Amino acid sequence: MGSGSAWARPPLLALLAGAWLWVGSGQSPPGGPTRSPGPALRFRLAGYPRKHNEGRVEVFYNEEWGTICDDDFTLANAHVLCRHLGFVAATGWAHSAKYGKGVGRIWLDNVNCGGSEKSIGDCKHRGWGNSDCSHEEDAGVVCKDERIPGFKDSNVIEAEQSHVEELRLRPVGAGARRRLPVTEGIVEVRYKGGWAQICDEGWDSSNSRVVCGMMGFPAAKAVNRNFYKLGSKFSPKHRPRAHVGSRQRLVAERQQLNYRLHSVSCTGTEVHLSLCALELVRGNASAPCAAGMPAVVSCVPGPLFAAGAHKKKPRQQQQGQPRIRLKGGAKVGEGRVEVLKGSEWGTVCDDRWSLQSASVVCRELGFGSAKEALTGARMGQGTGPIHVSEVQCEGNETSLWSCPLKNITEEDCKHSEDAAVRCNVPYMGYEDLVGAVRGCGRARPVPLVPVATPCAGQGGGRQPAAGPAPWGWAGPGPALTAPRVPQIRLAGGRTVSEGRVEVKRGGRWGTVCSDGWTTKEAMVACRQLGLGYSLHAVTETWYWDASNVTEMVLSGVKCEGHEMSLGHCQHHGASLSCKNTGTRFAAGVICSETASDLLLHAPLVQETAYIEDRPLHMLYCAAEENCLSSSARHANWPYGHRRLLRFSSQIHNNGRADFRPKAGRHSWVWHECHRHYHSMDVFTHYDILTPNGTRVAEGHKASFCLEDTECEQDVAKRYECANFGEQGITVGCWDLYRHDIDCQWIDITDVKPGNYILQVVINPNFEVAESDFTNNAMKCNCKYDGHRIWVHSCHIGDALSEEASRRFEQYPGQLNNQIS
């Protein structure tokens, strides 16, 4: 159990997080100014535009940040620098200040590495500070997005970094075992293939706060220690045979205590117990916790995980609207951080973004501490303003707004630097722990369930750890009961991320009816499995093996898309109703870790809107494609005209995967009139609404041809409609539909003068998966006087506060100003 009593103090998190990474240097550099003994070299990635694994290389030397000149720069140099930054290797490098010009000193020039050096200081160079370059020659690197095992990144907790790798709460009492999540119990740590306790000597609320944060809970509460002391009076050899009440339950399940930690001292701001001061138990101690008992913790669950929380609407708040939210994440408790300032939602710049700040966000939202503080728009780019930068929380704040931060302008930061988080969330037992689970075979930084994660058999699922089944485990075991919502697994797929959806009801596994199975239901299934986003909602699964399960146990599933489990969606219950009950028509999914995210450039709609009276003889093709209102059928063709509200729309893909049509080329529809293929039945809805939401005019736009019209700098076009090419929108590109092309309009011939709302909805039928559907709608105010139209206040549908949105939709203008 370890010899001697030692205080293990692992390295503290870096104070300057974000892209700042602390690394050790090798020997003293040759030539140049001599460096006195001091702190190790520090490296960071900077510049724009960039991702988390690329950028301008900056080095902190002699108490000053500086850059590296690109003269004689090679891929071998990039390998050494990427290893400094915690990545396994480099995939490329950049010259001529591709990521922007740095400031300060140019510390290194004519660097010449072999590629195997441990430090950039071991490579040949002109000497520290000796350079004939300007910042227009600053070098950058592109690193392989794979971390060196055990690398101590200031923004990620690695499981191998301390004496505490895995943690669990062991509940006491039969009633406690049946409830998920487990909120109270004896704190145990993984040790030598089993579980060991922590002596509660000196245990306080700060320690409990850290443990609860790791288990996915925002706060801790006091524990009735006397309840747990009842059982500790009896040794395993002298258990009484007749006891009643809580004493009997405690004694019956008491195990031989095996202490690993003698004491723990946390400040309460740590995101992981391993970052606290730990005193290990002496290996030869006869009574390692003579004066105490095992540490016990009781946690307060967040609103989403309290009893009956799934029956409420998402994000329902008892007191006002929240001022912070997560967007674009595949799972509960992760996403891009957005804050409400004034009446407008905006993002947070990742400068100095750290685990402490991320944990404040997580706890404020009702989750535990942060597993990761993500930089470089890892959860997709946001829209609108970037409200704050350089957030520097200590970790004990109740809100991000209580932390020191900097209000910024657009010039200070770009959306490619939006900050994001992954929070610890409680284990709820929604997924099948023997089925396909993401992350198979890889150690997880802070496990939600204290179990080993080997890949075994088809689907590569997680298996129980050696010894007794962990408390909270949703699998077999005499003392455990299944969670209230059905468990789920995938079967028959070629990979762990695809297959037929099977749920466990009434003790038996069965299929799900595919009637009405859409992207929304598939998104919930992938979320419940922990497999990311739904790439495809499969309604025919004849090509996947169905020899193990053929019975259907669930039908009528209808989800909103935000649920944590299929069991939280509407369904038929015990009475099944399905048109096709065979396994050929069972519901299936193909999940993906990334997804696209489309949104409209709202200002362009406002700038380009106008009215055109277009002659009927020029609208035959448009009529064939149903781009006019129904009254056009009764017009006196080819005489007369239709009044059209025209505008340009520019659809950006700000996600992390290309937007591709759901249908393959074989099913695209050829339209002879305009001589183009439609790859989607409906790509966009255009509506004119009254202030109370009544539709008075509508239009639709089939995907004439999805292509990359323009892209951000350094992003190459991939999709082009010419010669019947592939259709889609690349990440970082946009598709521009100009105001002067057919069907880029709304037929308002029958609309009376008045005040209205123009609404545009992209991907309205959820045909293609996106990481965030809530930003697919755009709204504008319109004033139409019978001759002219004014379009103003255009914005993405979820960009404003709830109060501002209500004011917008109840526009107080005159409802009818028709000219008599």
Image (cartoon, helix red, strand yellow):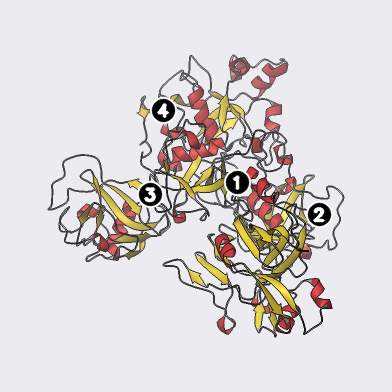
- The image position of residue 222, as x and y in percent, is 58, 20
Q: Is residue 191 above or below residue 600?
A: above
The number of discs equals 4
Name the element at disc 2.
loop
Q: Is residue 529 left or right of residue 375?
A: right
Q: Nearer the viewer, residue 385 or 504?
A: 385
- Asked whether disc 1 touches disc 4, contact meaning CB atoms under 8 Å apart, the reply is no
- Give the CA separation, mark 1 to mark 3: 36 Å
Indicate which label's residue lies in the foreground, 1 or 4.
Answer: 4
Give residue 463's mark. Answer: 1
Instruction: Indicate the position of residue 296 as horizontal and vertical percent values.
Output: 56, 24
- Nearer mark to the viewer, of 3 and 2: 3
**Nearest to viewer (mark 1 / mark 3):** 3
Q: Give me the disc on residue 379.
A: none
The alpha-carbon separation of the residues under discs 4 and 2 comes to: 53 Å
Callout 4, which amino acid?
Leu
Q: Is residue 171 above or below residue 820?
A: above
The picture places residue 539, in percent across and down from the top left corner, at: 74, 64
